[in-house]
Amino acid sequence: MTRSLNVYALPRFVTPKHLAGGPVVVIDVLRASTTIVHALAAGASQVIPCLEVEEARARAAELERGQTILGGERQGLPIDGFDLGNSPGEYVPERVAGKTVVFTTTNGTRAMLLCRSATRVLVGSFLNAQRIVDAVAPSPTVHLLCAGTRGQFSRDDILLAGLLVDRLTRDAPDLYQLNAQALTAREDWVAAFPQSALQPPDPPQLADVLRTTLGGRNLMAIGLDQDILAAAQLDRLPVLPELDPQAWRIRLARR
């Protein structure tokens, strides 16, 4: 039976109803999904995504004091009064282990809101790319949802989607029916890294390409180039963050 593999370059290209069939991988490489992977790999008990800053403050106030961290950004920069920003390197065990991270970002949370009816919602980054592939490979339908940057295409998300499509289809190219955006994403990845099947790009190589994207240029403009390199650590953290749409929290999946 032919399987379905779909990429959506921006949230506005898909409806919640369409995402109800099959797992959805939410992709916001620079930086929400990368930071969420870092936080859970560092021992955070859960991440609670919030759309607005005041919503995050109110949610944190409801939780146990001393066991809650406020994190996030607006316009790429830390939010006044929050404990952490949106830089992956901030989310280390000394800061987040055993704690709840209440998290709000410009793009990633909006993409997650589309997924409330999905059978499964995973958070993907370059750091956990193969773990994502292994998790969704058995599914007859897979959706890869790119967050974009302030409503615009951002090639960093498209490149990760292309890598995931390439790995899912590499050994069985006729197994999946790809939508047009999945075909384009895979072509973009292969064009950027034609030898990736034999030799995946190392972090400096991948970071060089990410710097040319809209998200990458924005980070460089505010002096956060180190976050681009942090996002380029391919397969470094093989964890599987999963959003529970009913409880509205992200935890490490058990499978």
Image: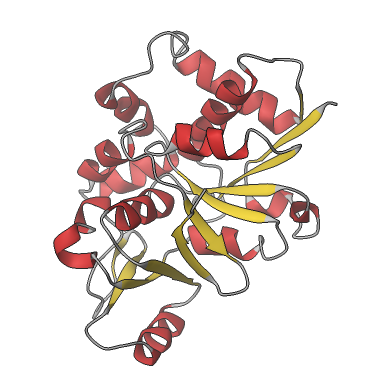
Percent of width and height locating residue 31: 38, 50
Residue situated in front as seen by the camera: 25 or 107: 25
- The coloring applied to the image is secondary structure
Q: Is residue 96 placed above or below 180 in the rendered structure? A: below
Residue drawn at (26%, 45%) of the image: 227
Percent of width and height locating residue 254: 49, 53
Residue situated in front as seen by the camera: 120 or 224: 120
Residue drawn at (27%, 52%) of the image: 88
Residue situated in front as seen by the camera: 204 or 176: 176
Residue drawn at (40%, 67%) of the image: 47
Residue 39 is left or right of residue 26, and the answer is left
Percent of width and height locating residue 236: 31, 35
Percent of width and height locating residue 24: 64, 49
Total marks placed: 0
- Residue occupying the far left of the picture: 94
Residue drawn at (70%, 57%) of the image: 118
Quadrant for residue 247, please give it: bottom right
Residue situated in front as seen by the camera: 245 or 125: 245
Residue 84 is left or right of residue 188, and the answer is left
Q: Is residue 122 placed above or below 143 in the rendered structure? A: below
Q: Is residue 177 placed above or below 143 in the rendered structure? A: above
Quadrant for residue 80, please give it: bottom left
- Residue occupying the far right of the picture: 1
Q: Quadrant of the N terminus?
A: top right
